[in-house]
Image (spheres, helix red, strand yellow):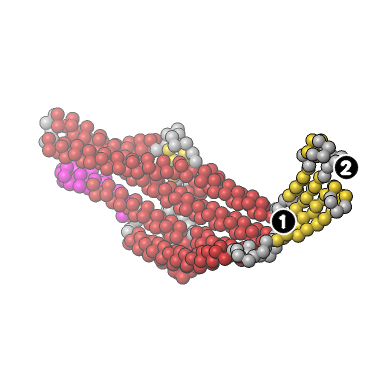
Amino acid sequence: MNRCHFFVFGLLLTGTLLLGQRRQAEAASPADTLTLTLAQAEAQFRSGNLQLLASQAGISENQAYEYQARLINNPTIYVEQMPYNHQTGEFMPFRRTNSEQVVQVQQLLLLAGKRNKQLAIARQQTTLAADRFYDLIRTLTYQVRSTFYDLYYARQALGVYGQEISTLRQTVNLFKQQYDKGNIPLKDLARLKAYLFNLTTEQQQFLRRVADANADLTVLLNVSPTIAIQPTVGETAATDSATVARLNVSDLYQTAEKSRFDLKAFRDGVKLEQQNLILQKALAVPDLTLQGTYDRNAGFIPNYFGIGVGSSLPFFNRNQGNIKAAAIRTQSSQQLSRAYQLQVEGEVQRAYEKALQTEQLYYTFDNRFNADFARLIEGVITNYRKQNIDVVEFLDFFDSYKNSQIQYNQLQNDRQQSLEALNFAVGANVLVAK
């Protein structure tokens, strides 16, 4: 291959790099693309996620049960009528001289504060429903943010592959023309084609990753699955001042104690069992039934009015079994709550250590390296044109450039994912990404 051919090749390679970048930018913005910042994605999630709406309805359902628990028992009425007077032979007699009618009204009176105790249980169940709702927000918000960044960095990686594949495809076409003219050996063309095939195979893996992340995000945001979501992030996903190293693990434990609604749900569950134990003890106290009776043609006097009081006698059943079961459930819930607290502390500790390790690795990487490396390609093209390097060295540089871009992209994603995992473990945004 003479110097003229190398010169032409160098110009084409430089031009195809720019062309690949332009095509990649055009391909990234189809008509059905939804471009979102993280804040916009979270707003869409909170307003449209179907799981959140269903869980929020659960709170309203429990509030309805709470309202029901406030209601007083209805009175009952009993009416008795003589169907047949065998002395006069009359059916359904209603005159005072030939029949008798009895009317009774009963009202159940709950003693030992049973209604208030039942209301307290209903309120506690509403609180538990709210705990589940807010913990679902925490869980799904983490999924939204994690998927958002995974999709963003996967698309960034696709941009690298798209640029290199576009450039290399043009290069293969150029080499094929030179090979047909007998200017380059077959082995050089074969190396280029093999490397192009390898890049295309690697690109497919990221295309599948983008498809999976996009599908998950459309479900979370409740948008059409045919929409391609294009996340946008600033130059830095998180500020350098928001470092894990400045955090104190003890403070993170305290924050998790206040912010983890799943932990709060365990503690509220203990309160629910305690209130149930109080109710079961109250149920051992018999209730009263007040009764009023009217007898139109009573045997004692006509138009008889009487009042009565009824109650069960707690000789045998004093609700002993339910009281014992409630006491056991209370003790068990306390142990489960304590065990879950230890689990939460372990999750916080583990997330903190992982985030710290990832951050330390992130800061050991010189972010100017990629920019300097990108500028080196011009020198490589020049040296390739001057025949100072061969096709093997040229492809080796291309591969090194691609690997450095992908690894740095993955490092950024790993760092952001570790920060989100820490926020998820703590239950609050201790390090807020921008």
Residue 54 appears left or right of 159:
right
Label 1 SS: strand
Marks 1 and 2, Cα distance to the nearest angstrom? 34 Å
Residue on which disc 2 sits: 97
Identify which residue is drawn at 45% across, 60% down.
425
**Which of the pair 349/310 is nearer the observer?**
310
Whether residue 390 appears in magenta in the rendering, the answer is: yes
Outermost residue to the front: 87
Read off the magenta span.
369-398
Residue 267 visible? no
Which residue is nearer to you in this view: 46 or 6?
46
Give the residue number, with chain letter if any, for mark 1.
108
Q: Residue at x 47, y 62 (%)?
A: 426
What residue sits 85% from the left and 41% below the top? 98
Q: Residues within 10 Å of mark 2 (few under 14, many from 20)?
A: few
- Which quarter of the figure has residue 248? bottom left
In the displayed structure, would residue 135 be above or below residue 5?
below
- In the rendered structure, the answer to whether residue 384 lies left or right of residue 232 reads left
